[in-house]
Image: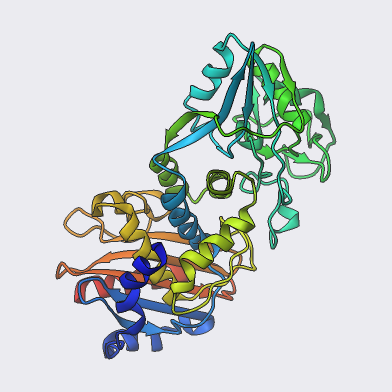
């Protein structure tokens, strides 16, 4: 039923003949010395007319970078529900058994609501944590191995804690860690170029490059996740015993503690392009649909149910866009955004989920305002040699458009590419 409903929605996209390309826009692309230096693609869709009105390499496959998060957005809107399940639990006698749900917010430095923490801290029952099997590695295919110690690429797990990162900072001239557990794992190895923290590749030990901590220093480093480490950190923060209970199947009568509204988490993911939130949301969706932590299966389900309706095939290997293996077309991005539009509710609810030009998120320093208001709302995507924007455009005429503008194989600084995209999209705003 879902498939046929979506097929009817996308009939105009798939079967209407594309309108004749506007000569002035064609000229903008053709005469751009910036765009001619790399592979670029563009698709523009008129929402009212229900047809594409312009396209350049719209059917060509590109690496989308964080435009991939729009796929995670649709997946979450369709499968997670109105609120994020923070944990699942049952009470058996004097014991409370609980499972992770993939929720990334538990003790997160920015997003924790304390709802799950307070529930575990105050319950009168004995606590038993049941680790659920995770059916894939903590890293996704196509992730850069050298980014293991960067805070934008933490381990993905069934029950994250502290965002699966350690905070290091200067407190009164001393290096302090949060969680404090990791302070015993710091060594000093003098290096070159001032003070920094470096995690060792395959263990949770961190090297400081100087005895003198730089003033104002603050850094976040991922830790290698394990059940033992999770339970140790949980005991420390709860100040109570937590016992691991292996090989206990989750019953059908579990209850949930919900941590926060789903759309608040989705907005955070989209506006600030948070990779960790995106990947963990894939796990939460997989948990809710299949009762297992298997993001690859979730992608297959979405491909069969939704993405098979696209004009072009897509190939996805993660939910964040860190993987260079991901391949999509500008035309498929537009069709995806039309599905998101149908799922998000009102136009206000929809646009709240996207960075707005000169106003919010990753677009806050790009574009100008039109009569004090933004005219572009789009997800950005940036990795080495890649920059993309896909989202919604309001024309000066009042007409509304969906667009995808993708750039691959960029050599050098992305600044010129961003400025050229702004110039072209601003021209379309003024003339459409």
Of 184 and 100, nearer the camera is 100
Residue furthest to the top in view is 124
Residue 305 is situated, as x and y percent measured from the top left of the image, at: 48, 64
Residue 323 horizontal side relative to residue 27, left or right? right
Scheme by which the image is coloured:
rainbow
Q: Quadrant of the C terminus?
A: bottom left
Placement of 192 over or under 230, stated as above or below: below
Residue 314 is situated, as x and y percent measured from the top left of the image, at: 54, 72
Question: How many numbered callouts?
Answer: 0
Residue 366 horizontal side relative to residue 105, left or right? left
For image coordinates 28% across by 66% down, the residue present is 393
Residue 309 is situated, as x and y percent measured from the top left of the image, at: 44, 73
- Any part of residue 107 in sight: no
**Which of the 4 quarters of the picture holds residue 50?**
bottom left
- Any part of residue 244 in sight: yes
**Which of the 4 quarters of the picture holds residue 99?**
top right
Residue 382 horizontal side relative to residue 214, left or right? left
Placement of 296 over or under 27, stated as above or below: above
Of 31 and 291, nearer the camera is 291
Q: Quadrant of the N terminus?
A: bottom left
For image coordinates 58% across by 14% down, the residue present is 121
**Which of the 4 quarters of the picture holds residue 366?**
bottom left
Placement of 362 over or under 41, stated as above or below: above
For image coordinates 72% across by 51% down, the residue present is 136
Of 114 and 344, nearer the camera is 344
For image coordinates 83% across by 39% down, the residue present is 203
Residue 282 horizontal side relative to residue 58, left or right? right
Placement of 95 over or under 191, stated as above or below: above
């Amino acid at each position: 039923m879902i498939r046929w409903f979506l097929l009817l929605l996308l009939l105009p996209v798939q079967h209407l003949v594309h309108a004749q390309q506007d000569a002035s826009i064609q000229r903008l692309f053709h005469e751009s010395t910036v765009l001619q230096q790399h592979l670029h693609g563009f698709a523009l869709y008129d929402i009212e007319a229900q047809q594409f009105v312009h396209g350049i390499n719209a059917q060509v496959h590109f690496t989308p970078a964080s435009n991939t998060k729009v796929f995670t957005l649709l997946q979450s809107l369709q499968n997670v529900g109105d609120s994020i399940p923070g944990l699942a639990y049952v009470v058996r006698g004097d014991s409370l058994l609980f499972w992770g749900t993939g929720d990334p917010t538990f003790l997160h430095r920015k997003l924790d609501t304390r709802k799950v923490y307070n529930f575990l801290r105050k319950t009168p029952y004995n606590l038993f944590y049941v680790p659920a099997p995770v059916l894939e590695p903590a890293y996704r295919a196509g992730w850069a191995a050298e980014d293991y110690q960067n805070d934008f690429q933490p381990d993905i797990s069934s029950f994250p804690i502290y965002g699966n990162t350690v905070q290091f900072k200067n407190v009164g001239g001393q290096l302090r860690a949060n969680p404090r557990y990791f302070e015993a794992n710091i060594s000093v190895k003098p290096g070159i170029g001032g003070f920094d923290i470096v995690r060792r590749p395959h263990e949770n030990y961190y090297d400081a490059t100087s005895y003198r901590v730089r003033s104002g220093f603050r850094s976040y480093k991922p830790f290698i996740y394990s059940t033992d480490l999770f339970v140790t950190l949980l005991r420390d923060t709860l100040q109570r015993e937590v016992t691991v209970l292996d090989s206990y199947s989750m019953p059908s009568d579990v209850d949930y503690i919900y941590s926060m509204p789903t759309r608040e988490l989705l907005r955070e993911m989209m506006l600030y392009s948070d990779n960790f939130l995106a990947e963990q949301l894939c796990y939460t969706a997989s948990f809710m649909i299949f009762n297992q932590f298997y993001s690859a299966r979730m992608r297959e389900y979405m491909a069969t149910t939704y993405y098979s309706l696209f004009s072009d095939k897509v190939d996805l290997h993660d939910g964040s866009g860190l993987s260079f293996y991901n391949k999509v077309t500008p035309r498929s991005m537009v069709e995806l955004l039309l599905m998101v539009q149908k799922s998000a509710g009102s136009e206000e609810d929809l646009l709240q989920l996207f960075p707005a030009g000169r106003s919010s998120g990753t677009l806050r320093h790009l574009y100008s305002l039109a009569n004090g208001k933004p005219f572009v709302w789009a997800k950005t995507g940036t990795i080495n040699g890649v920059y993309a924007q896909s989202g919604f455009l309001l024309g000066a005429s009042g007409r509304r458009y969906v667009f995808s503008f993708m750039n691959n194989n960029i050599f050098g600084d992305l600044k010129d590419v961003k400025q050229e995209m702004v110039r072209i999209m601003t021209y379309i705003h003024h003339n459409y």
